[in-house]
Image (cartoon, rainbow, N blue to C red):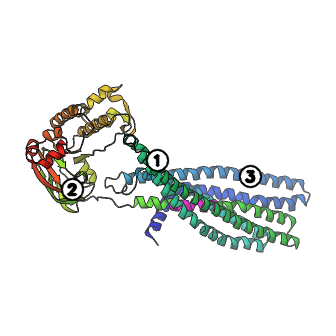
Amino acid sequence: MPATATTSRSVLRQAISGQRRQVTLASVLAAGHQGGEALVPVIIGVVIDQAVDGGSAGTLVFWLAVLALVFAGLSYSYRFAARAAEGASLRAAHDLRIAISRRVLHPGGGAENGKLAGELVNIGTSDAQRVGVVNAALPFGIAALAGVLVSAIALLRISLPLGLLVLLGTPPLLYLAHLIGKPLERRSEAEQERSAHASGVATDLVSGLRVLKGIGAEPAAVARYRDTSQNSLKATLRAARAKAWHDGAVLALTGVFIAIVALVGGHLAASGSISVGDLVAAVGLAQFLLTPFLIFSWVNGELAQGRASASRVADLLTTPAAVEPGGGELPSPATGNVRLTEVSYGSLRGVNLDIPAGQLIGVVAADPAAATDLLDCLGRAGDPAEGSVHVDGVDLSTVDPERVREVVLVAAHDADLFEGTLAENVGGGSPDEALAASAADEVAAALPDGTRTAVTERGRSLSGGQRQRVALARALAADAPVLVVHDPTTAVDTVTEAKIATGLARLRRGRTTILVTTSPALLAVADRVVVLDGGRITGEGGHAELVRDRADYRAAVLS
């Protein structure tokens, strides 16, 4: 059996077992409803045989009262069964969303690899909901089975052939319905994958809308989304056709089965083997059987879609972490001595770098990929293929990534802001100092409510330069022992950049700071600058010295 199938079943089992009490309650109540429904034609047959044919008014009133009680019972049982089943469905979907969120936000990372943000959202919403619906479908599937069993027992009382026909004919019918549901399961999974990809592309395009407009790339973006959306539409239509074929085929099988039951019952009545009341009960039971078989059809469809979504959820939850925790412990408080020894990772090749605690160092990377790889190693977003990264003498690959990020804070170039006030985005112990050092106090002064001004999602209500300054203020306010900053001033003017350089150097004095940048203003305040070219350290020294002596350095930072 494929590992994915086993894992998807595990996801379904966990979703059901997590709501066992609610599912059990819903199953019992729904079974009572279906059993009551099956008893209705039986009671009507008894009324005809004992009350109408016998002409007894008292008997008629008695059985009518019994019928009324049965109707009241099945009405209430259905209402509370539906409530319990829906509650179990919603709670299971909620639990899955929590599990998915924990996996996506896990410090070890890895869940986002190869997936757009919109795809992850789709798995955490649509797929989680489909898996949760299994908890709503299962009780009614059990109830439908109970209805069939009650009908079979009643038919056995009326006639042995009728009862055996229902009892022996139901399992093959259910198996055929399961086989018919296989294409629906496959196409539902494809539908969800294409839909998730379309959501991811749409999220990507919306988040970069300002950039797309700036470079005049709207037609290309529209064409890309049109192709993705059309692929999603085709997959959805294929799934819809599969569902229609599934429902129609199951309905046809059910109709044939019920017709056979009715014909056998009619033949027995014509031959005098059963009474008129028994015939009415048999025909009523044959008609009633349509309901549980329709329920079987619906449940089978929901299970097929639930299995497909469970497979996608399982793939995400079982994605291996990019980095694993170890037994190492960083000292508390950390002093911030950083050492890279023969580090090879991505485009990095044998990098050796020693940064004493409290030093402010600039790193100029000719290749943007090398800068990103360096940030990944320092923040333990990935472990080196060769070599090691040590902080205060401890190998980071042996330390829990969450603890690493308490000591080493990596402020990426594309850091996003959150929806909330400017003050909430900055946070930290000394927000005023951080705002001043990053020149974000000027941003606050220009806003209508200062630091209490609401910032929209990803900071879209601010300009690019304002977002950068607020993001830098957030990184500075955290006051991490080691701060790694990547190109924090690319969207600000030179005067503001010089102010930020001075403020950053002042605020971070005595704390280890690594500036991965080509900004002359930032590099000028660094204690020393190293040059990273071709994945290797090719030089180091003061900013002014490197500008004077190296043409490649001048080209990188002064062009």
Asked if residue 143 is among those painted magenta in the image, a careful observer would answer no
Residue drawn at (64%, 60%) of the image: 244
How far apart are the two marked residues, 2 and 3, measured between alpha carbons?
A: 69 Å
Residues rendered magenta in the picture = 296-308
Residue type marked 2: Leu
Asked if residue 299 is among those painted magenta in the image, a careful observer would answer yes
Where's the C terminus, which quadrant? top left
Q: Main secondary structure of the magenta part?
A: helix
Classify mark 1: residues with Cα within 10 Å, few (<14), some (14-19) or many (20+). Answer: few
Towards the viewer: 457 or 2: 457
Nearer the observer: mark 1 or 3; the answer is: 1
Residue drawn at (39%, 39%) of the image: 457
Residue 175 in percent (x, y) is at 62, 71
Residue drawn at (63%, 70%) of the image: 176
Left or right of 255, for residue 384: left
First-in-chain label (1 vs 3): 3
- Please name the residue that numbered disc 2 is placed on: 396
Mark 2 near mark 3, Cβ–Cβ under 8 Å?
no
Quarter of the image where one finds residue 322: bottom left
Left or right of 400, for residue 523: left
Residue 331 visible in the shown view: yes
Numbered badge on residue 485: none
What secondary structure is marked by label 1? helix
Towards the viewer: 72 or 102: 102
Residue 301 in percent (x, y) is at 60, 61
- Please name the residue that numbered disc 1 is placed on: 222
Q: Is residue 70 above or below residue 450?
A: below
Residue 66 in percent (x, y) is at 78, 54
Quarter of the image where one finds residue 154: bottom right
Nearer the observer: mark 2 or 1; the answer is: 1
Residue type marked 3: Phe
Towards the viewer: 329 or 217: 217
